[in-house]
Amino acid sequence: MVTNNAYKVTMFFPLRNNNDEEYGLEVWDWWQERITTILVGFTDLGQVKGWWFGHSDENRWIVAVVKSEQEVEVLREFLEMAATKKYFDQEKMYLDYHPTCYEEISRA
């Protein structure tokens, strides 16, 4: 029987600010540099539309697997920094994580 050995993490990053303006290249450059420092790999599932407190929005959907709660905490801190006025200027950022079974399958 396989036991949980990792955490599957889902994060959303808004594509536009609360004034419906696209974020500048400096925000996405910071985002790219920071996320690739934190994670050795992740999947960008692309653009998704959602609904939040009476308005629709579009987000970048990121999924990753990390091996410890410490790594989840580092991602939480990243999202807290991303939420600041310097970057995405959001009151809240989405983070979902749960225990999962992670396995790397090698060719025979």
Image (spheres, grey):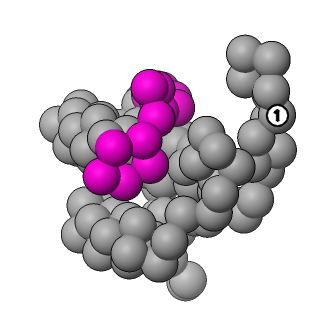
In x, y percent, where is residue 104?
A: 47, 64
In x, y percent, where is residue 55?
A: 80, 27
Q: Residue at x 36, y 54 (%)?
A: 87
Q: Residue at x 27, y 66 (%)?
A: 34
In x, y percent, where is residue 74?
A: 21, 43
Q: Residue furthest bottom?
A: 108
Q: Quadrant of the C terminus?
A: bottom right
Q: Residue at x 72, y 16 (%)?
A: 53
Q: Residue furthest top?
A: 53
Q: Nearer the viewer, residue 14 or 6?
A: 14
Q: Secondary structure at mark 1?
A: strand
In x, y percent, where is residue 14?
A: 60, 48
Q: Is 89 colored magenta in this rendering?
A: yes
Residue stretch in magenta: 85-100
Q: Determine which quarter of the picture holds residue 71.
A: top left
Sort mark 1 into few (<14), some (14-19) or many (20+) by Cα contacts within 10 Å.
few
Q: Is residue 100 visible?
A: no
Q: Is residue 29 left or right of residue 97?
A: left
Q: Nearer the viewer, residue 43 or 99?
A: 43
Q: Nearer the viewer, residue 108 or 60?
A: 60
Q: Residue at x 42, y 41 (%)?
A: 89
Q: How many numbered markers are drawn?
A: 1
Residue named by callout 1: 56
The amino acid beneath tag 1 is Ser
Q: Is 68 colored magenta in this rendering?
A: no
